[in-house]
Image (cartoon, grey):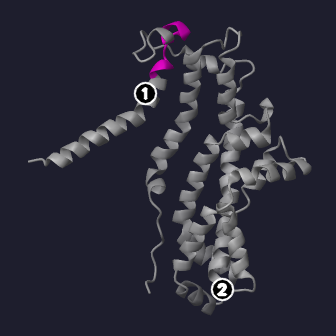
Amino acid sequence: MHKPHLIALFVFFCFYSFLILFPYLYVLLNSFKNGYAEFIQNPLGMPKEFIFDNYLAIFRLEDFSIVRMFTNSLILCLVCPTLSCISCVTAGYVMAKYNFRGKKIIYTLYLLPMVIAICGTTLSTYTLLDNWNLIGNFMSIMLISCGGTGMNFLLVHALFVNVSNTYMEAAEIDGAGYFTVFFRIMLPQAMGLVGTLWIMGFIGQWNDYAAARLFLGPEPEYATIATGLQYLYMQLSTADEQYMNNYPMYYAAVIITVIPMVVLFLCFQKQIMKLSLGGGIKE
């Protein structure tokens, strides 16, 4: 016999799940409606007829190239998490496994960005990149990704601290050098965490609007999915017939941009939901 508190929890989580899924269902259903007239008449109801032309219309817009925006976002989503993982893994490994003069000071500097509000660094970062003539260029965001500081560094550092030094000692006895120990012995121990950080970085970069808008500027050549959707939303209030109040088309664009993230989550949901450590010698 079911206990009352278990039934109450089940009902609560069903209701909570509905609240989370409702916005996605709302956008999906409205993306199939035939123009603004049907949308405004019954925004919460089912479409009278499922119209797929909204999805095709997105690819026919002259000044809104969703293919180019997909390409720009994909370039940043592949390069930026990779640079971030390389920098935080190498820094975290060195700080965890080697002792040298000034180590504590450098460690503190690596954690310092976590305690400084983003509003305190954005202006200085923009000014620096502007002086280097990198504003309106992919290199600006890629360069920011090379820092390797903050929470990612802290996680990688904590992982290497807890990996047994027996691995290093055994490899050094066999004549392995520093790079051999890192790439063949220590790095495989961290691949579970590194993979998770890379995937989360990919998702974060795909949805990032602020950095893309600030450092890439309004030029359509460098527009990403996030800035492109904002541009499309702003066009809904214009007098242009292909945009004016065409919310179903806008919702279709939103669904198109969500599909890659859904596929990514379905493929790597176990990697995203847990951090794994390599097995090995227990002390």
Coordinates of residue 91 in the picture (x, y in percent): 69, 71
Which residue is at a point 71% across and 23% down the rendered structure image?
64
Coordinates of residue 172 in the picture (x, y in percent): 63, 89
Q: Which mark is residue 176?
A: 2
Rendered position, 234 above or below 113: above
- Left or right position of 13 against 103: left
Asked whether 113 or 24 is in front, the reply is: 113
Q: Which residues are magenta?
A: 29-39
Q: Quadrant for residue 55, please give it.
A: top right
Kindly identify the amino acid type of the residue bearing the numbered disc 2. Answer: Ala
- Left or right position of 92 against 121: left
Query: Do tag 1 and tag 2 residues touch (Cβ < 8 Å)?
Result: no
Kindly identify the amino acid type of the residue bearing the numbered disc 1. Answer: Leu
- Where does label 1 land, which residue? 25
Q: Report crowding for label 2: few under 14, some 14 to 19, many 20 or more residues within 10 A (C-alpha).
A: some
Rendered position, 200 above or below 155: above
- Counting residues from the start of the chain, the first of labels 1 and 2 encountered is 1
Secondary element at tag 1: helix
Which residue is at a point 66% across and 14% down the rendered structure image?
243
Coordinates of residue 73 in the picture (x, y in percent): 68, 40
Rendered position, 173 above or below 66: below
Foreground mark, 1 or 2, reads 1
- Give the total number of marks visible in the rendering: 2
Q: Which mark is residue 213?
A: none
Rendered position, 221 above or below 100: above
Q: Report crowding for label 1: few under 14, some 14 to 19, many 20 or more residues within 10 A (C-alpha).
A: few
Q: Residue furthest left?
A: 1
Secondary element at tag 2: loop
Which residue is at a point 64% across and 72% down the rendered structure image?
92
- Is residue 35 in the magenta section? yes
Residues under labels 1 and 2: Cα distance? 56 Å
Q: Quadrant for residue 153, please give it.
A: bottom right
